[in-house]
Image (cartoon, helix red, strand yellow):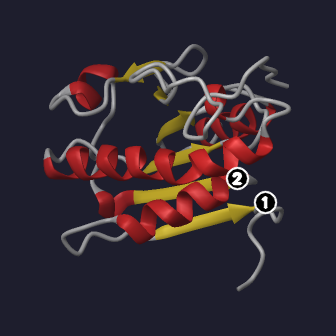
Amino acid sequence: MKVSLAPRGYCPNCCPVKAGADIRFVLYNKVNPDKGAIIEPHTSGAARRAGVDPALPTVIFIHGFTEPSPGKSGRAIVDAYLSRRDNFNVILVDWSELATFPWYLPAVRNVKFVAERLRNFLEVFDDSGEIPMKKLHVIGFSLGSHIAGFTGKRLKRGLRIPRITALDPAFPEYSLR
């Protein structure tokens, strides 16, 4: 469990977000199954340099509240996909600095910010052909489910995520309206 003395993100008492440090995109594949390689967002060619193979399907996993990255759920996703006969690019979205215990409400407020960063990441790398949207599956757990949904909703230029899976979506602060 990730614990912090002060919340980080977008709220009146939050510490400011550290660009590039509070949200990270980490690639795992059969060449690099254990440590992962960080993909620098907004940098053309960065996904290929990290080891993304654009010919392969890509799975993006977004963890939930208080989970470090890679936590149990992220590691389970990586291991499940990399143990298959087929090859995959598996990218974990690490937003653990913005989702620390006991700061649930600030974490909820950070969901749309993380979704916006992921949307931008996907659009940049779809444009460059490094992570084609047509081969993408986004999986979110708990608050990560809401990040996945908001990301899909915010895509521009007619882009769509072909498959979004929400695992145990968070309910507090997300009632049906």
Residue at 60% x, 40% y is: 11
Residue 162 image point, x, y percent: 42, 71
Residue at 27% x, 54% y is: 132
Residue 111 image point, x, y percent: 58, 50
Residue at 68% x, 26% y is: 70
| Frontmost residue, 35 versus 93 | 93
Q: Is residue 23 left or right of residue 170?
A: left
Q: Is residue 103 left or right of residue 126?
A: right
Decide: is 135 above or below 41. Answer: below
User: Which residue is disc 2 drawn over?
Assistant: 143
| Frontmost residue, 38 versus 174 | 174
Contact between labelled residues 1 and 2, with CB atoms less than 8 Å apart: yes
The alpha-carbon separation of the residues under discs 2 and 1 comes to 5 Å
User: Which residue is disc 1 drawn over?
Assistant: 170
Q: Quadrant of the C terminus?
A: bottom right
Residue 141 image point, x, y percent: 72, 52
Amino acid type of the residue tagged 1 in the rendering: Ala
Amino acid type of the residue tagged 2 in the rendering: Leu
| Frontmost residue, 143 versus 137 | 143
For label 1, count other residues whose C-alpha is less than 10 Å away and answer few (under 14), some (14-19) or many (20+): some
